[in-house]
């Protein structure tokens, strides 16, 4: 699992590939889905588009974080993490 740096202009380092999912960990809440740069630039907009099988993906993500990075839950600031490919490829989408 790799930490992502998202700049104010929505640029992501390291760069994301088309099917990469991003894990958003903020104040104990977790989201996982496709990062939308356009929505990121709109204040107050949810910029993570979650898959239809969100709950299944979240179970996998929580398990992986607990296994590899449990200390991340203690962080006070928002973290963006590259979702492992083994979990990302499980995502199911409407209209895709």
Image (cartoon, helix red, strand yellow):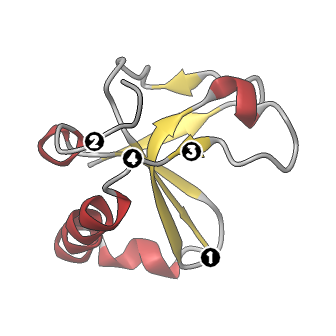
Which callout, 4 or 1, points at the residue further toward the start of the chain? 1
Find numbered disc 1 in the image and state the secondary structure of the residue it sits on.
loop
The x and y percentages for residue 24 are 51, 55
Residue at the spot of label 3 = 48
Q: Nearer the viewer, mark 3 or mark 2?
A: 2
Marks 2 and 4 sit apart, C-alpha to C-alpha, by: 6 Å
Check disc 3: other Cα within 10 Å, few if <14, some if 14-19, many if 20+: some
Considering every residue shown, the one lying at the far right of the view is 43
The CA distance from mark 4 to mark 3 is: 10 Å
Q: Which mark is residue 5?
A: none
* Quadrant position of residue 61: bottom left
Q: Position of residue 65 (x, y in %)?
A: 27, 68
Q: Count the labels in the image.
A: 4
- Residue bearing the label numbered 2: 92
Residue drawn at x 55%, y 26% as measured from the top left: 12
Can see residue 10? Answer: no
First reached walking from the N terminus: tag 3 or tag 2:
3
Camera sees residue 48? yes
Give the left or right position of residue 18, taking residue 9 as reference: left
Residue placed under numbered mark 1 in the picture: 27
Of badges 1 and 3, the one in the foreground is 3
Residue bearing mark 4: 51
Q: Residues within 10 Å of mark 4 (few under 14, many from 20)?
A: some
Pick whichever of labels 1 and 3 is earlier in the sequence.
1
Which SS class for mark 3?
strand
How many neighbours does mark 1 have within 10 angstroms: few (below 14), some (14-19), or many (20 or more)?
A: few
Q: Nearer the viewer, residue 53 or 60?
A: 53
Seen from the viewer's position, the closer of residues 8 and 53 is 53
Which residue is pictured at 65% across the width and 26% down the height? 37
Q: Residue at x 53, y 34 (%)?
A: 35
């Amino acid at each position: 699992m790799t930490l992502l740096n998202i700049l104010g202009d929505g640029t992501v380092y390291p760069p994301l590939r088309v099917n990469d999912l991003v894990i958003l960990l903020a104040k104990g809440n977790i989201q996982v889905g496709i990062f939308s740069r356009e929505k990121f630039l709109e204040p107050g907009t949810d910029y993570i588009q979650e898959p239809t099988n969100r709950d299944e993906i979240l179970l996998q993500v929580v398990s992986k974080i607990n296994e590899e990075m449990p200390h991340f839950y203690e962080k006070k600031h928002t973290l963006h993490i590259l979702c492992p490919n083994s979990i990302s490829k499980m995502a199911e989408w409407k209209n895709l």
